[in-house]
Amino acid sequence: MNPHIVAIFGGAISGAEAAQQLAQRGIRSVVFEQNALPYGKIEDGLPKWHAKLRDKEEANIDEKLAHPLVSFVPNVRLGRDIDFKDVVSNWGFSAAFLATGAWSDRPLAIEGIDDYVGKGLYYQNTFIHWYNHYHEPAYSGPQLETPDGAIVVGGGLASIDVVKALMMETVQKALKSRGIEVNMFDLERGIAKVLEQHGLTLEDLGLKGCTLVYRRQVKDMPLFPGETDTPEKLAKAGLVREKVLTNAQSKFLFAVLPCHVPVDKIVENGRLAGLVLRETRIENGRVVEQPGTEKVLRAPLVVSSIGSIPEPVPGIPMRGSVYELGDAEHCRLKGYENVFAIGNAVTGRGNIKESMEHGRTITETIAEHYLSDPEGTFAEHLREKEISVSEQISGLVDVIDKLPAPSSGKADALFGKVTKLQKKSGYSGNYSEWIAQHLPPRLEQLLGLTGH
Ligand SMILES: Cc1cc2nc3c(=O)[nH]c(=O)nc-3n(C[C@H](O)[C@H](O)[C@H](O)COP(=O)(O)OP(=O)(O)OC[C@H]3O[C@@H](n4cnc5c(N)ncnc54)[C@H](O)[C@@H]3O)c2cc1C
């Protein structure tokens, strides 16, 4: 048996791929996951209307984590339940991989605005987590509000998801108050279509709709992963982005305010009541604010969707908003011989383009592909992520081989600690059983729909 044992923090797309790559080489790994389910952004970030894609990706993760050389430890959060330095330095692991993703929202740069989180302001990760789970009978998290006329700040795909979710929630409620029941899956095919079927408009329902506020031009929106390294490719990417946004707007009836940046908050009665926006100009690719162009945009809700960054963990060195690497080639953490960052934890980026570039070069045809099959493109992105992790692990196997492996006594003690943590979480070691017990009821099941 290979003497090395690797700790993997985070069990989703990247962590599971790393565990599989190691298992294929006969290396044992222990996957510490903060949640009961190891699905990360697939479960809590990918909006729930992508039910088929979600199920397929989760099954893919399950297959990898059920491998006999992988020990899964659910409900154990690095930095809270286990100490980073202690695990990587004292437990006996040959190496450790940080596959913890990017779960902190990049803060809105307006002084004091975070005092209004939950009082007129939400950030994207919290919003989509709620959206994906609030229908579950056992959901006990915060209940979020979705008033009409919200502002969404952002410009990437995730911000379009937030706008879509808000529009669907408000239209669904308004239709219900008129006695018209439609479900999320109907609305996701196009709000415009549903309203047309009922001979209604947003105005008839008394709705204003959301406004997406973006600091650049529509043609700059990171809405699909495409190359932009020549003027021709840049122009083509711009056209595709405009088309993607126009398609989304005509289906989901939201407004877009490009070339505006939030600079101040409007507060009333202890709640955020809107934003002060300033116009921008794009000069040589840079956003230049135009002082004196400020205007007030009032709204009962602001959702900020300007990107996700890795969460700080005590003991893990940070450089700005990302983990600090000492050796960029291997993504080795600064100050640690045996700790490597993988997946979103490396890039910490809020957009797919840059995380894909972390893997391999993107083909131009993805632009056309995105328009006809956005879900397929997303799945493709996940495959790219796996490829980049798998290539990284291939490069790391030799590095790990040179690191000290635990003695058999130390390995026994290590697995003793692992078993203790598993027991504390109520995990018996039967992966499939655990997943079956913890998978929540899905909206499509609750609605009695099949084929989703
Ligand atoms: C709405 C949306 C937004 C997206 N945003 C991005 C993006 O910003 N960048 C990008 O490249 N791709 C993004 N994607 C694409 C894609 O989802 C991700 O690239 C991919 O899923 C990332 O996989 P991962 O395993 O690296 O990270 P994640 O899916 O985030 O998985 C990390 C795992 O680590 C666990 N974890 C986190 N902290 C701890 C801890 N302290 N202890 C133990 N476990 C922990 C989490 O619970 C999770 O299971 C996004 C997709 C969607 C739908």
Image (spheres, grey):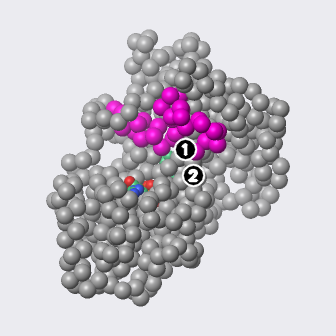
- Identity, as a three-letter code, of the amino acid under mark 2: Gly
The residue drawn where x is 21% and y is 60% is 422
What number is the disc on residue 350?
2
Q: Secondary structure at mark 1?
A: helix
Ligand 1 neighbours mark 2 (CB distance < 8 Å): yes
Q: Which residue is at the far bottom?
A: 402
Q: Give how far apart the Cα atoms at labels 1 and 2 are.
A: 8 Å
What number is the disc on residue 2?
none
Q: Which residue is mark 1?
A: 158
Is residue 151 found left or right of 89 in the rendered image? right
Q: Which residues are magenta?
A: 107-136
In what quadrant does ligand 1 lie? bottom left
- Identity, as a three-letter code, of the amino acid under mark 1: Ala
Ligand 1 neighbours mark 1 (CB distance < 8 Å): yes
Whole-percent x, y for residue 260 in the image? 73, 36
**Depth check: 330 or 224 in front?**
330
**Depth check: 435 or 281 in front?**
281
